[in-house]
Amino acid sequence: MKSLLKKMIFVCPLNMATVCIVLLVPFVLSCSYSGKIEEQKIFKESRTSMYTVVSITVVSKSGVEVKKAVDAAFTEFDRLASLMNFYSNDSEISRINNEAGIAPVKVSKDTFDVIERSVYTSEMTDGAFDVTVGPLVKLWDMQKKVIPDKKAIEESLKTVGYKNIVLDKTASTVFLRKKGAQIDLGGILKGYAADRGIEILRQNGISSAIVAVGGEVRAMGTKQDGLPWVVGIQNPRQKGANDEIIATMELSDKATSTSGDYNKYFEEDGVRYHHLIDPKTGYPSKYCGSATIVADNAITSDGFSKLYILGPEKGLAVAKKLGFDAIFVDCNGGIAMSDGLKDKIKFIHN
């Protein structure tokens, strides 16, 4: 039992590059996996899945119950990743992309639902979020510091456009009208996975938990003390160990996601090139900082965190229209947020 205990409870480092929302959770150092009826405790497990670090934190009396639920959730994450992996030749997404301009492809309900939601998100953001940005994504390589040739960007832009996606719900098929077009669900899939993770936990008897798939966080219920979960918003221009978190906020039965220019980027000649590509220009968005969305579910917060590309003024207008909250933090520490967050966020002054 001791080895199992060590596996189930450990704390991930807060400066992990893949995590844009930092979980602030107290951890229990001694929990029983014997199945005995005990007081509620917090259990946490982190694994690599969905191409990132996934953390599941659960409130429960039974470690046995937790292990079953957590294992089921991670099995679901792996299943979703295999279905919608942009870089795998065997995924449904690759089948759709390979048949672009040729024929519709029948897909699973999960893949269809995520693409359908992606089209909606694209429409509501005026194309700032666009899942057909795949050809542009492949041109930019943040690790190798590759700046694509202007002509290559112009050619790829000809294939980008969510309006070229044809969905047939009855047949569960997806068709890309333009040959060379490619769907990449990397900007919304982790949010969908976080939602599914919460649903799997609920089906396995868990009523209080928080799931973090990279920077996409979905909370259910409260901590064992009855108080909401607390998450921290990262400082987009962290200068030292003491200013990683710029603010904290409470989260209960809600989801939150952050997009920013500080996660995957490189600098050349004083210019920061990051992974948030504007589908209309083919280049990284010019907005400097981060955008955090708080919504009822993580597929919404994940997809709409790309309002970052529109900037605060237009982004906040979309959030207000659709009924969720947003906060923009620029690289100088300037804040713009929706009214619904003004009494829910606590800023940290270092």
Image (cartoon, rainbow, N blue to C red):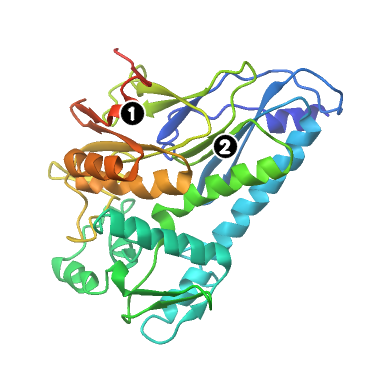
Give the residue number, with chain letter if any, for mark 1.
340
Q: Report the side of 57 relative to 131 (left or right).
A: right
Question: Which mark is nearer the camera, 1 or 2?
Answer: 1
- 240 relative to 200, above or below: above
Give the residue number, with chain letter if any, for mark 2.
55
Q: Report the side of 189 relative to 305 (left or right).
A: right
Counting residues from the N terminus, which is met first, the one under dot 1 or under dot 2? 2
The residue shown at (73%, 42%) is 204
Observer-nearest residue: 316 or 330? Answer: 316
- The spot of residue 338 in percent (x, y) is 27, 31
The residue shown at (80%, 26%) is 2
Observer-nearest residue: 29 or 178? Answer: 178
* Quadrant in the rendering for residue 80: bottom right
Amino acid under disc 1:
Gly
Q: Are marks 1 and 2 in contact (CB under 8 Å)?
A: no
Observer-nearest residue: 313 or 156? Answer: 313
SS assignment at label 2 = strand
- The spot of residue 313 in percent (x, y) is 17, 39
